[in-house]
Amino acid sequence: MKYTYIPRGVCSRMIELEIEDDVIKSCRFLGGCNGNLQGIGRLVQGMEVDEAIERLEGIDCAGRGTSCPDQLAHALRAAQES
């Protein structure tokens, strides 16, 4: 399944996911800190969705109450629910 998510409260503008059998096949951020977000995308490849959510949820960036990794957790939850 391919899923697109529009994050809120962060620099990235879009998260594109491909999930198959509850495993993240690809993750791509548009906008934001390019190198860091490419790294996060590669680190979660092959990871089960629930594990990625557990590891990323709640990470804060500069007191914003969220971050790109946290928004990825939100995107993964939304993808599960769709």
Image (cartoon, grey):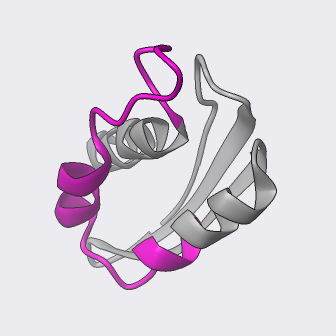
**Number of callouts in the render?**
0
In this rendering, position of residue 51 left or right of residue 19: left
Name which residue lies at 32% across and 49% down.
Answer: 56
Identify the image quadrant of residue 31: top right
Q: Is 69 colored magenta in this rendering?
A: no
- Region of the chain picked out in magenta, as a range: 41-67
In this rendering, position of residue 64 left or right of residue 80: right
Most extreme residue toward the bottom is 46
Q: In front: 22, or 44?
A: 44
Coordinates of residue 17 in the picture (x, y in percent): 55, 61
Classify 29 as above or below 21: above
Coordinates of residue 67 in the picture (x, y in percent): 50, 32
Name which residue lies at 75% across and 64% down.
Answer: 35
In this rendering, position of residue 30 left or right of residue 22: right
In this rendering, position of residue 28 left or right of residue 17: right
Most extreme residue toward the front is 62
Classify 42 as above or below 31: below
Name which residue lies at 79% across and 57% down.
Answer: 34
Name which residue lies at 28% across and 61% down.
Answer: 52
Coordinates of residue 80 in the picture (x, y in percent): 29, 49
Q: Is 55 colored magenta in this rendering?
A: yes
Classify 27 as above or below 61: below
Quarter of the image for the C terminus: give it.
top left
Coordinates of residue 12 in the picture (x, y in percent): 72, 37
Identify the image quadrant of residue 14: top right
